[in-house]
Amino acid sequence: SAVGLTASIVRDPETRDLVLESGALVLSDLGICCIDEFDKMTETTRAILHEAMEQQTVSIAKAGIIATLNARTSILASANPSESRYNPFMSVVENIKLPPTLLSRFDLIYLILDAPNVENDRKLAQHLVGLYYETPNIVEPPLDHALLRDYIAYAREF
């Protein structure tokens, strides 16, 4: 939601004063904010992202509190195709139904396509179900966590 990404005004339980509570974009200042289900955002939330991605700030004016908060964050977002399957005969914009004005604010856009494969899908399903066994069936990830962290740190330098 827009409030979850930016900030909200809440009443402090001890003092009963209104206080500003930071959202994900503000909390991830100088870091990375990961947003899932990007395609399901409302127009209001998308409008807020325009400011955050362009100005690197989030403005709030609620309950007599007026503030501009830093949101100098990298955004990593994931979105699903509108028809649940990517249509190679349509553009990226048509597939995920996000406005070009918002998509243009991203430096990189990667398509991760899932080609149906019975054997791989079965392994994935067994792994996911196995996580809920009494003794979980944990498989080592194909990419080392330290390598991924270092890669992201390196990429942020550019």
Image (spheres, rainbow, N blue to C red):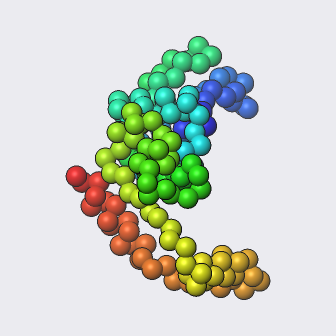
At 35% across and 32% down in the image, what residue appears? 54
**Which residue is located at x 59 percent, y 52 percent?**
83
> Residue at (61%, 37%) from the top-left corner?
1
Which residue is the extreme one toward the front? 89
At which x and y percent is residue 48? 49, 30
As rendered, which of 38 and 98 lies closer to the eye? 98
Q: Nearer the viewer, residue 71 or 143?
A: 143
Instruction: From the viewer's side, name the closer residue of 90 and 5.
Output: 90
Residue 53 quadrant: top left
Horizontal relation, residue 67 to residue 63: left or right: left
The residue at the far right in this view is 134
Q: Nearer the viewer, residue 103 or 77?
A: 103
Q: Position of residue 102 (x, y in %)?
A: 41, 36
Residue 149, compared with residue 97, is above or below; it is below
In the displayed structure, would residue 145 be above or below residue 58? below
**Image quadrant in which you'd find residue 105:** top left
Q: Residue at point 43% right, 72% down? A: 145
Up/down of 99 relative to 152, above or below: above
Residue 38: image location, x then y, percent? 53, 46
